[in-house]
Amino acid sequence: MNPDLDRLQPYPFQRLAALKAGITPPAELEHIPLSIGEPRHPAPQVAVQALQGALDGLSRYPVTRGEEALREAIAAWATRRFQLPQTALDPGRHVLPVNGTREALFALAQCVVDRNRPDPRVLMPNPFYQIYEGATLLAGARPAFMDLTADNGFLPDPDAVDPELWDRCQLLYLCNPGNPSGAVMDEAALLRLLERAHRHDFVIAADECYSEIHPREGTPPPGMLGAAHRAGYDGFERVMVFHSLSKRSNLPGLRSGFVAGDARLVEAFHRYRTYHGCAMAPPAQAASIAAWRDEAHVVENQALYDRKFRAVLEILDGVLDLQRPAAGFYLWAPVPGDDAHFARELFAREHVTVLPGSYLSRETPGGNPGRGRVRMALVAPLEDCVEAAQRMRRFLQAGA
């Protein structure tokens, strides 16, 4: 067996299941899960119809690079969304469809990390999406954590990282908008990290999967593609950006996303993936083309989240210190006492599941930056989110 498998830690939801084991919540209360970031809004019909109309594609093998029409649809969307010149993003050189960004975020480390270099390191936020850590360990590197706390606005601070660590860094995982806080880095902050990448010779994996979940009346979060191009990095050098239809389009089961950026890295990643065996099925490609071309369902999706945030924040006002995040569909809520105890008791007394923040983080010299918080995913229907918030208010007022 690969000995690096023994370095993997239990996934947060395994720990959550163990935390809840043996508890019998009130039978009269229906369970409301707010723990998993799985969109529950209806899939857009434009994508469903395209999928159904392309089922004859199951009779042929797909190619790893994806159909030209899909790469063109992706490039056109990214060009519009991040205000790029029309010819900046070449569908043939800068874009690669992937089967959801989870597998691509994992696979990139296997492609990029050189385990023969002394003490290879991969930097990542803390709290973080645990795929970053698992990818790092199985690539033969060591993770290094950038603690995200209220004191730094839940944003990575490159100046807080030791210069020697930057020299050993081969890959930086960046989540913007952030999971779980929803904090958003502006273009100036993105460029500070990109400048570090060029100075210290590493690649940035920019996970931007929550970029389309933001207040409808607000400014859309910036992206690394736009920041890089406007700063003069016309070829997106050292940048690999990840986007998904799971959150944007409520299509988590489609397993569809893309990677875009540095043509040299995209080509190397494509070569890796031809052996990895992960080409997207033709019907999924047809659905993806339809979804990337349509913005109407995205606007409707944002409006649904707007209503849920307004309702939940109004109910929890005065019992939790909360405000609407800049993006994403999570509330990163500070809670009284130990976060795991809070989550366990909330489930036991109110049949509502939230995720302890300490399960999303690792201990560092500064402590565990997720301790004392829980992540609440407002993905359930509006009425369920309202009911969960009312139960949580009752729980807090009774003494959590």
Image: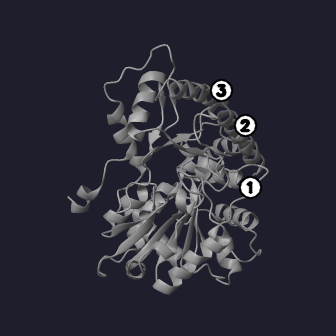
Residue 108 occupies which quadrant of the picture? Answer: bottom left
**Callout 3: helix, strand or loop?**
helix
Give the foreground label among 1 and 3.
3
Residue 271 visible in the shown view: no
- Residue to which mark 3 is pinned: 383
**Callout 2: helix, strand or loop?**
helix
Q: Is residue 225 above or below residue 6?
A: below
The one of 341 and 140 positioned closer to us in this rendering: 341
Residue located 51% across and 20% down the image? 30
Give the foreground label among 2 and 1.
2
Residue located 66% across and 82% down the image? 234
The one of 134 and 359 positioned closer to us in this rendering: 359
**Callout 1: helix, strand or loop?**
helix
Residue located 72% across and 37% down the image? 307
Which of the image's four quarters has the N terminus? bottom left
For badge 2, the amino acid type reads: Arg
Residue located 70% across and 61% down the image? 73
Labelled disc at residue 293: 1
Q: Is residue 269 left or right of residue 246?
A: left
Tell me the distance, in whole angstroms, between the alpha carbons under discs 3 and 2.
Answer: 11 Å
